Amino acid sequence: MITLKRSRADDPNFQLLVDALDKDLWARYPAIQQNFTPFNKIDATACVVVAYAESYPVGCGCFRPMDGEHAIEIKRMYVKPESRGLGIAKLILSELEEWGKEEGFTQVKLETGNNQPEALAVYTRAQYKIIPNYPPYTHIAESICMSKRLV
C-alpha cells in the first residue's frame, strides 16, 4: 500500500530521494547536468510530498510558487527505479496539484527533459501540455516545459 505524506524540504526522506534523483539526472545528462544545479535548489518554502511503500520512502515531489503568477512549479519529482510502473508518480503529482489548489493557485508548470520518457508519459497522461520553455530553461534544447490549469 502506498501512503503520501505532506512535508517540507528539510524532511530527511525527501533529502535521500533527492540525492537519488540527482544521481539519476547526472547519468541521463552527463554533459549538461551541472547547468541545472542552480535551478534545482529547494528552499524552506517548498511544499513537499513523500510517498511510502509501508514505511519505506519510494518517491517524492514538491512545488514552489512562481513569482508574479498564480502558478506553482513542480520540482524534484522522483520515484525509485524498483518502484516505477505502480502509479506512484501519478499519486504524488495529484497530491501536489490538490495542495496547490488548496493554496489558491490556478496553474501548474514544470520542466522535464528529453531523456526522461517516463516523466513525459506521466505528465502527458495527467493532461499536461507542452509550452514554450520559460526562464531559466528558455535556451536549453534538452528542456521540455509543460503546463496545466488547476480546476
Image (cartoon, grey):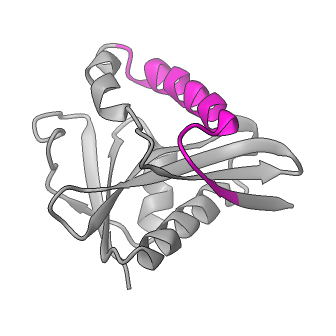
Q: Residue furthest left?
A: 139
In magenta segment, residue 7: yes
Relative to 129, 7 lies left or right: right
Which quadrant would residue 30 be assigned to in this image?
Answer: top left
Relative to 114, 5 lies left or right: right
In magenta segment, residue 87: no
Q: Position of residue 114 (x, y in %)?
A: 34, 39
Residue at 89%, 51% (x, y): give it.
Answer: 54
Of 114 and 9, nearer the camera is: 9
Residue at 18%, 39% (x, y): give it.
Answer: 137
The residue stretch that appears in magenta: 5-30
Of 133 and 50, nearer the camera is: 50
Of 134 and 130, nearer the camera is: 134
Relative to 76, 92 lies left or right: right
Which quadrant would residue 11 be assigned to in this image?
Answer: top right
Residue at 24%, 71% (x, y): give it.
Answer: 70
Q: Position of residue 131 (x, y in %)?
A: 19, 60
Which quadrant would residue 73 be assigned to in this image?
Answer: bottom left
Majority secondary structure of magenta residues: helix
Q: Residue furthest front?
A: 44
Relative to 140, 79 lies left or right: right
Q: The N terminus lies in which quarter of the figure?
A: bottom right
Residue at 29%, 33% (x, y): give it.
Answer: 39
Is residue 29 at least partly visible in the picture? yes
Q: Position of residue 82 (x, y in %)?
A: 75, 38
Q: Position of residue 151 (x, y in %)?
A: 38, 86
Is residue 80 at least partly visible in the picture? no
